[in-house]
Amino acid sequence: MWHPDVPLDQSPASRSEGEAAVAAGTGEGVDAALEALRAGGNAFDAVVAAALVDMVGLPAKCGLAGDVAALVVEAGREPASLVALGRAPATPSGLANPAAASGLAVLADRGRLGLDALCAPAVALARRGAAWHPIMATLTHDARDRLRANQPGGSAYTPADGPHRVGDRVVLAGMAELIERFAAAGAGLFAEPDLAAAVSARMAEVEPGGGERDPTDVHVEWAPALRGTAAGTTTTWFSPAPTAGPTVAAAVERAAGSSLVDAVRDLRPVRTTTGTSVVGAVDGDDTAVVVAISNGSPMYGSGVVVPGLDLVLSDRTRSAAGPGGLPSMGVAVWAVESERGVHVGSTPAGIDVIGWHTQLVAHLARGGAPEEVAARPMFEVRPDGSIKAEVPPDGRVPAWADQVVGRLRAGVTIVTGGRPGAAVAVGDGRLPVRTGAIS
């Protein structure tokens, strides 16, 4: 539920076009991405810089202890996907090993600028303090009980003397130091003895008897994107398992032969939510990259913060049986080929993440312009099977909708390449997602 004092943004989708274009969850993230491109970086540099800044501005949704799913579309190559995911512990637990640092380091290896330059904007923001975002006020309010239970003495996100207010400058000194160390250590960040000990000790406090944890036990892999079709003939690509990409691909194919509502309703058994921030970029070489960085739950992941590091530990629903298995991911990243170019995107959405992905891909495949698709009224299937829908522009309530609301939680990010010199970034106005471009 949205906190009553935090209004939803009612603006339409934002759109930026130029030689290169970017999208992020915060305005500072867009600035960092554009700065990387102007310094001679490419799309990989841009998304890493943006992701790190979003971690400072939106720590309830994403962080260095989270997971990463990315899709890359390059001219002359088949789309590829990167997944960085913490493995399951020896006993059932919501806590996941930190994988985002490894994933971002792998993406940065495809860049030109190096981690020192890419981390600098995030470090500076954490030290001077990011303005407390309305989304952070909402998610902190929603997660207040679990945060208090896990951090009874308070944390940087839940001060003992009362909650942060929207617009407050929140300094995250521990996160600033952690990102600085990431700049030096890269994928080996949590192999640093003191950091490994701090993370392992915090996990042991939360899950006593769970055995010793190795925070470096993560799965990082490049793989070909899963190829599919939509609207009968349109070529699509999806991030492969363990992301939700295969599920979305199957639903999109079903939608070609039935109603979109029925296709999404069929997904009810795999309903899921995620705490995710999405960043994207298209550079002057026509390389498009979209990255979803997720804490697992939208309410501060596991709700556990490592003291002194401002590090939020992620959680995942474990689907694999036995130690070392990979948990499933509710996130997906996809691409859709069209006359306008190749659209690459993702969304953290709300309670019906996979249903949102399915609707977005289906509408793009049917020829919708990204800015129209991102702002289009959406619907979600609730856990009880009822359908909640946004009010359409004409005000007519669909016959299949059980409940109609002004806005659902969202956060659609779409970047479009395939037309050199005409890169486009589109961001959903509901939360909102910010965009920018270089002319």
Image (cartoon, rainbow, N blue to C red):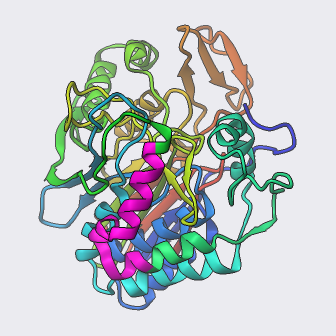
Magenta-highlighted residues: 181-204
Query: Which of these two is toward me, 89 or 65?
Result: 89
Q: Residue furthest front?
A: 209
Residue 439 in sight = no
Name the residue rendered at 70%, 74% in the picture.
129
Q: Foreground residue, 353 or 21?
A: 353
Foreground residue among 156 and 347: 156
Q: Position of residue 271 (x, y in %)?
A: 44, 21
Indicate the position of residue 11 as horizontal and vertical percent values: 72, 51
Residue 203, magenta (yes or no): yes
Q: Nearer the viewer, residue 177 or 391?
A: 177
In the picture, measured across the screen, residue 394 lies left or right of residue 187, that is: right
Which of the 4 image quarters holds residue 284? bottom left
Q: Relative to residue 200, is residue 136 drawn left or right?
A: right
Magenta stretch mostly in which secondary structure? helix
Q: Position of residue 280 (x, y in %)?
A: 42, 62
Residue displayed at 59% across by 83% down: 124
Does any portion of residue 142 appear in the rendered image? yes
Res. 227 image quadrant: top left
| Residue 306 % position (x, y) | 53, 56
Q: Quadrant of the N terminus?
A: top right
Image height of 265 relative to 309, above or below = above
337 within the magenta span = no
Residue positioned 12% across, 62% down in the render: 77
Q: Give the total number of marks visible in the rendering.
A: 0
In the orientation shown, which residue stands out farthest toward the bottom? 39
Residue at the location (75% across, 36% down)? Answer: 2
